[in-house]
Image: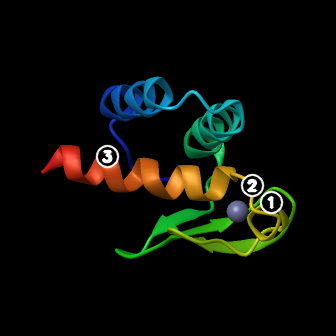
Amino acid sequence: MMNLNQAALAAVIQTAFDQTSNLRWQMAIAKARRELEDNPYMHFDGGALLILSPSGEIYSANGSCQCKAYRNGQPCWHRAAARLIERYNEAAH
Ligand SMILES: [Zn+2]
């Protein structure tokens, strides 16, 4: 699990959620939040968020991803999580 300030992360997530009216992105953000809180296999390497998904797949997400949703042009929680971490890091400094 990433060592994150939960209050700061919650604020970043709420802002991101409020800034999109796209239901799929909102769902992706909600899933990203659960994974950021519970998934021990996530690591930000400075450029991308590395994720061992509950499905067993490994993803490296920033603006792009390797998952099926991304290939289909859909929002995915991997990219949502990567963007949330970027925003969290920006807010923290
Ligand atoms: Zn993805």
Estimate the x, y position of residue 33 in percent, counting from the top left.
Answer: 58, 36
Check disc 3: other Cα within 10 Å, few if <14, some if 14-19, many if 20+.
some
Estimate the x, y position of residue 50 in percent, counting from the top left.
Answer: 57, 71
Q: Which of 60 and 2 is in front in this view?
A: 60
Note whether 77 is above or below 15 in the view shown. Answer: below
Mark nearer the N terminus (1 vs 3):
1
Callouts 2 and 3 close, C-beta under 8 Å: no
The kind of secondary structure element at disc 3 is helix
Return the residue found at the far left. 93
- Give the residue at x 75% y 62%: 73
Does residue 18 appear to the left or right of 55 in the view shown? Answer: left
Q: Which of 33 and 20 is in front in this view?
A: 20
Estimate the x, y position of residue 26 in percent, counting from the top left.
Answer: 63, 32
Cβ of mark 2 under 8 Å from ligand 1: the answer is: no
Q: Tell me the kind of residue under disc 2.
A: Gln
Find disc 2 in the rendering and name its residue: 74
Residue at mark 2 to residue at mark 3: CA–CA distance: 23 Å
Residue at mark 1 to residue at mark 2: CA–CA distance: 5 Å
Find disc 1 in the rendering and name its residue: 69
Residue at mark 1 to residue at mark 3: CA–CA distance: 24 Å
- Give the residue at x 30% y 32%: 8
Estimate the x, y position of residue 71 in percent, counting from the top left.
Answer: 79, 71
